[in-house]
Amino acid sequence: MKFTIAIDGPAAAGKGTISKAVAAHFTFAHLDTGLLYRATGRKVMAGMEPLQAARALQPEDLEREDLRSAEVAEAASKVAVIPEVRAALVAFQHAFARRDGGAVLDGRDIGTVICPDAEVKLFVTASAEVRARRRFLELTASGDATRFETVLADVMARDKRDAERDTAPMKAADDAVLIDTSELSIEAAVAKAIEVIGARLA
Ligand code: DC
């Protein structure tokens, strides 16, 4: 069975958590497409040219432990603006989306550009303040002495770059179901996603 679930939205809205939970619930494979851009950005930080880095990507590059930092997120958002870099990453995402047994892909342009025919599209969002607060709490819990204002400014700068770029900007597909997690617990957000997907599968 081929069944694609596209989950888009800005950073720290909860789309990663929802995607993992949904994939586990329906036993579908999951691809965090942000990792493709992060792994490319990481190679650029190490001195490689962006397009060369995207073309050289290997599955094991997505397993690196150091892809979660704010610096790598920034580098990812920058390489993601380059149309040729995006084009180099399309085939891998298409193949993943149409694998047998069902697939969940989360990112920014899955429902609009990569999988416009996805069986289910969700757009998961939350206010910038709520998302920055979540990121800030995660960072301080892991011993990173940052300021809330710095995290908020980073979140807003990344949103702006992702939403305003010319190629495949972050936006909700017309037929996406919106889930705003500003005032929803993660359990409630996951339950809502499962309800929407369950209804389409039935
Ligand atoms: O989801 P994330 O925070 O790991 O994504 C990192 C960056 O990668 C994000 O700021 C923009 C880019 N990205 C993208 O342009 N398209 C995607 N489908 C996923 C991520």
Image (cartoon, rainbow, N blue to C red):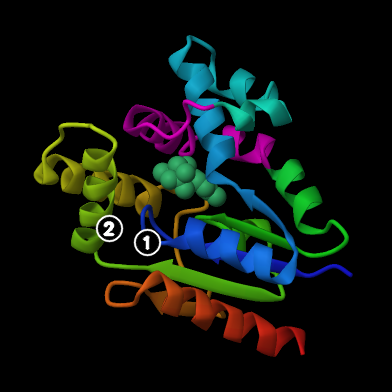
Q: Vertical placement of 53 versus 47: above or below?
A: below
Magenta part, dominant SS: helix
Q: Which residue is mark 1?
A: 13
In the image, is 179 to the left or to the right of 129?
right
Please provide percent x and percent y for residue 142: 29, 36
Question: Is residue 194 in the magenta section?
Answer: no
Say if residue 41 shows up in the picture.
yes
Badge 1 crowding class, 10 Å Cα cut-off, few under 14, some 14 to 19, many 20 or more, is many
Please state the horizontal and vertical placement of residue 9, each as a whole percent of the image. 44, 61
What is the spatial separation of the Cα atoms under label 1 and label 2, in whole angstroms? 6 Å
Does ligand 1 reach within 8 Å of label 1's beta carbon? no
The numbered mark at residue 131 is: 2
Question: Residue at 37% across / 31% down in the picture?
Answer: 69
Q: Which of the 4 image quarters holds residue 35?
A: top right
Residue 83 seen in the current view: no
Residue 138 vs 172, above or below: the answer is above
Q: Residue at x 54, y 15 (%)?
A: 49
On the rendered image, what quadrant is the C terminus found in? Answer: bottom right
Q: Give the image location of residue 87, x and y in percent.
A: 65, 39
Q: Amino acid at mark 1?
A: Ala
- In the displayed structure image, the side of residue 95 where residue 107 appears, left or right: left
Instruction: Looking at the picture, tell me which residue is in the foreground, 32 or 143.
Output: 143
Q: Nearer the viewer, residue 201 or 159?
A: 201
At label 2, the amino acid type is Arg
Query: Dot 2: what SS?
Result: helix
Q: Residues within 10 Å of mark 2 (few under 14, many from 20)?
A: many
Q: Residue 26: x and y, percent?
A: 72, 71
Q: Are marks 1 and 2 in contact (CB under 8 Å)?
A: yes
| Label annotation for residue 52 | none
Q: What span is colored magenta in the figure?
A: 65-89
